[in-house]
């Protein structure tokens, strides 16, 4: 009969055309802001054994937790490392400028979470056995949102 309409078709669920950038995805572990400096190394062996947490940027842009933060001895929050000096990050090679796009995205995702302040002071990054000039580090930090 006239005036009757078919029920509206169910709305299609909107889906993004592109996946969110890797550094915006859930990491599967907590990354708390750092109080100290971040040591950038090419090998975990370059870090003192008491530095924690230590993450590794894997070839291709994956992330791995290599040393967890120490467990709290009481109700007070745990500092970012056993000695309060910050954390460590193992890069997939000894040259910061040689990181592939996915590896840089993973690195930037961690830096964004570790250092919420903007601008990030260059002194917060400490390359140890990694070729990274002050200009290289400043270029990297400019990518932080």
Image: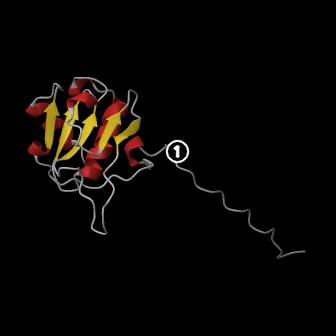
Residue 56, quarter of the rendered image = top left
In this rendering, the answer to whether 46 lies above or below 70 is above
95 left or right of 63? left
Q: Give x and y (percent) for residue 83.
A: 17, 50
Instruction: Tell which residue pokes out farthest to the right in this image.
Output: 1
In this rendered view, identify the residue nearer to me: 125 or 2: 125
In this rendering, the answer to whether 61 lies above or below 4 is above
Q: Give x and y (percent) for residue 23.
A: 37, 44
Question: Does dot 1 land on a helix, a strand or a loop?
Answer: loop
Residue 38, quarter of the rendered image = top left
In this rendered view, identify the residue nearer to me: 70 or 126: 70
In this rendering, the answer to whether 58 lies above or below 65 is above
> At 22% from the left edge and 23% from the top edge, which residue is drawn?
95
In this rendered view, identify the residue nearer to me: 39 or 105: 39
The total number of labels drawn is 1
64 left or right of 125? right
Q: How is the image coloured?
A: secondary structure
In this rendered view, identify the residue nearer to me: 93 or 103: 93
> At 34% from the left edge and 34% from the top edge, which residue is drawn?
57
Q: Give x and y (percent) for residue 5.
A: 81, 71
> At 30% from the left edge and 34% from the top edge, which residue is drawn?
104
Q: Quadrant of the N terminus?
A: bottom right
Label 1 sits on residue: 17
User: Dot 1: few (<14), some (14–19), or many (≥20) neighbours within 10 Å?
Assistant: few
74 left or right of 7? left
Instruction: Tell which residue pokes out farthest to the front in this image.
Output: 73
Q: Give x and y (percent) for residue 26.
A: 44, 50
> At 15% from the left edge and 41% from the top edge, which residue is drawn?
125
Residue 99, quarter of the rendered image = top left
């Amino acid at each position: 009969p006239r005036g009757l309409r078919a029920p509206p078709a169910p709305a299609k669920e909107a889906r993004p055309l592109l996946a969110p950038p890797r550094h915006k995805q859930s990491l599967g572990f907590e990354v708390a802001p750092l109080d100290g400096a971040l040591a950038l190394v090419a090998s975990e062996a370059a870090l003192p054994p008491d530095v924690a947490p230590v993450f590794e940027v894997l070839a291709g842009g994956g992330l791995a937790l290599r040393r967890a933060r120490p467990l709290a001895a009481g109700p007070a929050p745990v500092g970012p490392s056993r000695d309060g000096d910050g954390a460590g990050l193992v890069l997939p090679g000894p040259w910061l400028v040689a990181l592939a796009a996915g590896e840089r995205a993973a690195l930037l995702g961690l830096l964004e979470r570790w250092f919420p302040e903007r601008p990030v002071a260059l002194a917060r990054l400490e390359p140890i056995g990694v070729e990274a000039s002050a200009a290289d580090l400043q270029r990297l930090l400019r990518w932080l949102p």
